[in-house]
Image: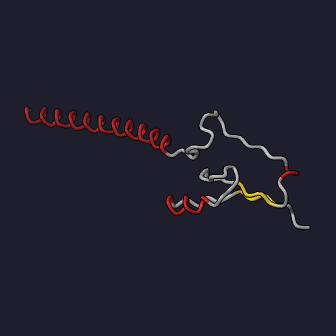
Amino acid sequence: MGGYSNVKEWVAAISLTIGAAAVGYLAYRSLYSRDKCRKSLVNLDIQKDTPKVVHAFDVEDLGDKAVYCRCWRSKQFPMCDGSHTKHNEETGDNVGPLIIKKREV
């Protein structure tokens, strides 16, 4: 009967260890995901002193074609300067510009 209680104690200890490991893993994953989001900001340095970066343009002022940045790396933001090419090479991303042009008649 002494051997049976040893097995019960081992099973209880192993169950407790597995449960603690699962809780620890879930807590780590939750914290790691939150930290990862903070490090993967899209806007690294454009108008960081404002709560939200917003640009508005009148369609009449666009001319025949306007090319806007979507990678947030352009030195001429919000206009595209081709910085997405380097960004894509470095990150494996596939972002490109937003192109707005007049319909050809």
Residue at the outermost bottom position: 105
Of the pair 56 and 29, the residue shown nearer to us: 56
Residue closer to the observer: 22 or 88: 88
Q: In the shown orientation, is residue 3 left or right of residue 14? A: left
Instruction: Tell me residue 103's x, y (percent).
Output: 86, 63
- Residue 74 place in picture, x, y as percent: 62, 53
- Considering the image in quadrants, where does the N terminus appear? top left
Q: Quadrant of the C terminus?
A: bottom right
Identity of the residue furthest to the left in this view = 2
Is 28 placed left or right of 73 in the picture?
left
Image: 41 above or below 73: above
Q: Quadrant of residue 81?
A: bottom right
Q: In which image quadrant can residue 53 be found?
A: top right
Q: At x 85% / y 61%, what residue is drawn? A: 102
Numbered disc total: 0
Residue occupying image coordinates x 58% and y 45%: 43
Residue 96, percent across and down?
65, 60
Of the pair 7 and 56, the residue shown nearer to us: 56
- Give the vertical position of 57 relative to 97 (above or below): above
Residue 48, given in percent of the width and then of the height, sits at 59, 37
Q: Residue furthest front?
A: 75
Q: How is the image coloured?
A: secondary structure
Question: Residue sitting at 85 percent across and 51 percent down?
Answer: 61
**Residue pictured at 61% horizontal, 34% vertical:** 49
